[in-house]
Amino acid sequence: MAWQRVASFSEIDVDGVLGVDVNGSPVALYRLSNEVFATSGICTHALALLSDGFVEDGRIECPLHQGQFDVRSGKALCAPVTEDLRTYAVKLEGDDVFIDMERPAASAPAVANAAPNCKAGDGVRNAEEGDQAGTRKIATMNVDPELSLTKRYVWPAEGLTRIPDWVYTDQTIYEREIERIFHGRTWNYVALECEVPKVGDFIRSNVGPTPVVVVRADDGSINVVENRCSHRAAEFCRELSGNVKEFVCPYHQWSYDLQGNLAGVPFRRGVNGKGGMPADFNNAQHGLRRLNVTTHRGVVFASYLDDMESFQNYLGPEVLNEFEATFDGRKPRLLGYYRHTLPGNWKLYHENLKDPYHATLLHTFLVTFGLLVAGNRSLMLADATGRHGVMASAKSERKSVSSDAKKEMRAYRDGMTLAEPRFMDFVEEFDSPWSVTMATIWPNLIIQREMNTLGLRQIIPTGPHEFIMKWTMFGFEGDDEEMTRHRLRQGNLMGPAGFLGLEDNEAIKFVQDGMQHVPGGQHLVKLDPAVAAGTSDSLISEASIRAMYRHWRAEMGL
């Protein structure tokens, strides 16, 4: 490739950086006195645009994690960056700057050591420091944050059949998910109505990582408020559940009624005419942040948006039908909880339950005892948007599994038996052709119906690499003692150490480990090419995962 004119010398500030696009590749140009140097414009650590960074003493500092590179040699100087930048040859002709994308820069002495303040985790800068660093210049290109984001995070050209690692590992992406998904146009599961049956009953919950309190008010309504005092931001509710007449913040004793209204402020008028709140302080303007709430068949959902569509429209007719097959009008009755942390990205759990392919291969119990086997009557349903899904299967008898299928399924164990023969009993109680359904309700709920054991799994993300899973196991008010014992017995399938749950937990960790330890890759999701994205009647399919990421990309603007 020949020399290409890419900019004017006068466009580049002294000790500054200018970002340019050369044949679709971001390039960073640096001016040190009367010399110009060129490197790849993307940080090798986390895909940030270096044109948004700072130049000082011949170093470019990445704006995202404060790693530094020598602009002359491209050498990585300090953590977290470890991989050098690619450099390009530069020549000046008058005011014109030319680069050759196929030739590296001529050898130049690299900066010997990183700057004294270049430390892992030292990402805090104050405004005064920025003003004093007179030689630091922020490039004028890509000042639009949305434009910068879409250039930094580029989806593979193959489309939905490839998913880049940064979807699961990047902090900026995670923070955008909280804003646009969990705090965006979604209904988030927060509780069962039976968990707050009486006035004053409350339970702590979450919308994404945000702590909330679900409480039954004096008028019988269910309210969901942020667990954050409007005074100094303390989490005022410390118990997991209970019954109260009011909420009192432990820090300064501000109190709130059961609808989140500010009821009392100690020493509001001060003491002896001194101190206290301003005369125009209005309690009505300082209540707890209250979320929009809806319930359906005993299940409570909350949203940060007041103009949400109805829950029925949010699910769509097919997924709503499966939801109502489980919540069939009987009143749910709480049986208990599991709670554990998983070292993986929260979306991997959605994928896991939109991936019937793994279920036929990973889970010894499922395939050996006929709960989910390749060849079973089955369905991997996706709603029209792609955000929700239902994995469904009809239980088969072990003798119906073909010898060819057994050869493909290494997890299959001929001769394995149960010490408790009642474990696999299936009492037909639902108006459904399926013995197993796993409904994924975007963004934070899985409804599990595995024969007769019933549970809700609430996803609580805590960062790009970890989430909490809260399992709420339930039955129905009309269950007799025998049915309750049967549900609890079959509950050993699930939970952090269940016959099935344990294997999924490890698999999710393995995937996250692979992305963290060997970063910069892509996932392959090509199974079932006859279905571009959406519902499939085959268990050997990833079409529902593709549909989920079609929706995710639209919501994220990526």
Image: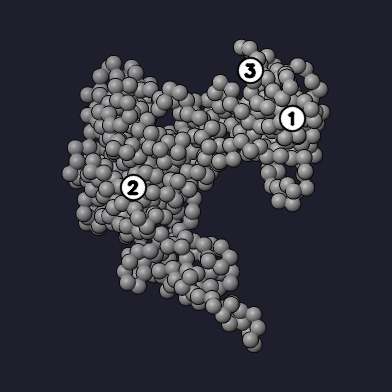
Q: Residue at x 56, y 63 (%)?
A: 234
Q: Nearer the viewer, mark 2 or mark 1?
A: 1
Q: CA distance from mark 2 to mark 1?
A: 61 Å
State which quadrant residue 331 falls in: bottom left
State which quadrant residue 225 falls in: bottom left
> Do the residues bearing badges 3 and 1 touch, measured as CB atoms within 8 Å?
no
User: 493 and 14: which one is in front?
Assistant: 14
Using the image, determine if residue 364 lies above or below residue 466.
above
Place of residue 471 in the rendered image (x, y in percent of width and height, measured from the top left): 40, 48
Tally of marks: 3
Using the image, determine if residue 71 lies above or below residue 407.
below
Place of residue 34 in the rendered image (x, y in percent of width and height, measured from the top left): 79, 27
Residue 527 appears anywhere in the view: yes
Disc number placed over residue 484 in the picture, else none? none
Q: Residue at x 23, y 48 (%)?
A: 324
Q: Residues within 10 Å of mark 3 (few under 14, many from 20)?
A: some
Q: Badge 1 is on which residue?
A: 31
Three-letter residue code for mark 3: Gln
Which residue in the rendered view is the most extreme toward the bottom? 272
Which sits earlier in the primary sequence, circle 3 or circle 2? 3
SS at mark 2 in the image = strand
Q: Badge 2 is on which residue?
A: 455
Decide if residue 64 is on the left or right side of residue 386: right
Disc number placed over residue 4 in the picture, else none? 3
Three-letter residue code for mark 2: Gly
Place of residue 113 in the rendered image (x, y in percent of width and height, measured from the top left): 80, 31
Q: Nearer the viewer, mark 3 or mark 1?
A: 3
User: 317 and 108: which one is in front?
Assistant: 108
Residue 364 appears anywhere in the view: no
State which quadrant residue 533 falls in: top left
